[in-house]
Image (cartoon, rainbow, N blue to C red):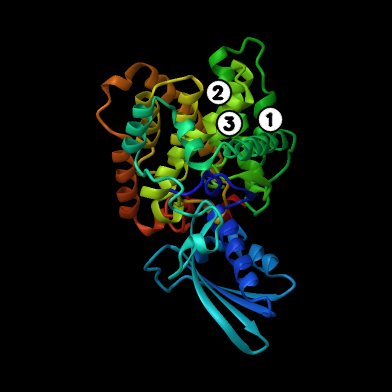
Amino acid sequence: MQSLRELYKVGRGPSSSHTMGPERAMKIMKERFPEADSFKVTLYGSLAMTGKGHCTDVVLKKAAEPCACEVVFDEKTPCTVHPNTMDISAFKGDSALSTKRVYSVGGGTVSFEGESVKDYEKYADDSVYSLNTYSEISEYCMSKNIRIWEYAAECEGVEIFAYLSEIWEQMKTAIHEGLTTSGVLPGGLGTERRAQYLYHQRHIDESAQTRENRLVCSYAFATSEQNAAGGVIVTAPTCGSCGVVPAVLKYMQETRGFSDIEIVRALATGGIIGNLIKKNASISGAECGCQAEIGSACSMAAAALAELFGMGLGQIEYAAEVAMEHHLGLTCDPIAGLVQIPCIERNAVAAMRAINALSLANFLADSRKISFDLVVQTMYNTGRDLLNGYRETSSGGLAKYYNLKKQR
């Protein structure tokens, strides 16, 4: 598996696959062909069908500056390898220098056809972690009497915690910015920011349970709204699912007094879970539906919480498994290709579900029948079976039946 630096990335929203990935691909092409004075990018599959809503063309043109960049949306040519496919051509005058086929595989990571990712991504070496299943990692940790975050330190060095500290600071910054900003999100849907309103709606006799729900959800809304507005967030594991992990960790730190180092260790544990999903299945909504994004984020959050509370390896596995299992089949159907409806609310719902998974793991881990590895395999196969309209094409589900003209 790759470094956690490839999973947790700081970048601008609204989409890791549709903005961060294409931006990264264009920057690589500019580095390779510094003599180029123009570029042409042809987008296929999900990139073509939801690229306008995700501002893919805007990001590509900005990344190409000062060179000119033509962006073509090809919604008809089938994608045989990955639904997030693009061809990038570099030109010097009228002469074509090169054309590269690139896949945006999720979480801001790109893959150039016929090339090894580690050749152009510093931390994308697949051998950073030699163990690639939870059962292998669990067995190894038990044999050495260490926790999962300690395994991460073994593989990446203790300097990974300095990086994760920066990630945690950015997560908190995104929440703060989201809670202190109001107004309408861009894109034409007229979606109002609701994090600030939700955060301040205290009731005079509010129960502890209601307060937990309100605060956790407000933190998830805050981060997700920042993402939808093109703000700076952390992929966890993607832009579209960036609100889940920070929401639960922020709430637990505030209410339970966990230190930053404890939070960072929890991020490492949650990151290993995200890495396992990325390695053995997918974190791309275009490939496997929203279960691959929100489901993965919920698993990461549940595992991180279990680490915070000092749970055992079996309980961590149960929390992550439950969180994913009950997102199986979740479709990715963003209205107008925008990461707003239903994406923002899903982050809040998944954050609360992660807390529920933690509670179940505390009581029922010894009775579990389904392994985390099995549910990851199931998620991947389920995602591949989803009709194309339910895999981030904005041609099915809510995106199909929501009448934009009528709502306007």
Q: Residue at x 69, y 37 (%)?
A: 178
Q: Earlier in the sequence, mark 1 or mark 3?
A: 1
Q: Determine the CA span between mark 1 and mark 3.
A: 29 Å
Can you name the residue that lies furthest to the left here?
369
Q: Residues within 10 Å of mark 2 (few under 14, many from 20)?
A: some
Q: Nearer the viewer, residue 155 or 166?
A: 155
Q: Is residue 395 above or below residue 277?
A: below
Amino acid type shown at disc 2: Asn
Q: Position of residue 158 (x, y in %)?
A: 57, 36
- The x, y position of residue 234, in whole percent, is 61, 43
Name the residue type under label 3: Val
- Secondary structure, mark 3, is helix
**Which residue is the extreme one toward the top?**
205
* Residue at x 58%, y 27% (from the top left corner): 263
Q: State the CA–CA distance, disc 3 to disc 2.
A: 23 Å
Q: Determine which of the numbered discs, if any, sits on residue 213 in the image.
A: 2
Instruction: Looking at the picture, tell me which residue is in the foreground, 127 or 233.
Output: 127
Identity of the residue drawn at 62% across and 22% down: 259
Residue 209 position, x and y percent, is 53, 16
Q: Is residue 219 left or right of residue 111?
A: right
The label nearer to you, 1 versus 2, is 2
Considering the numbered disc 2 on the image, is that residue within a helix, a strand or a loop? Answer: helix
Q: Position of residue 368 (x, y in %)?
A: 28, 25
Residue carrying label 3: 264
Kindly identify which residue carries mark 1: 197
Earlier-in-chain disc, 3 versus 2:
2
Give the Cα distance between marks 1 and 2: 14 Å
Image-quadrant location for residue 361: top left
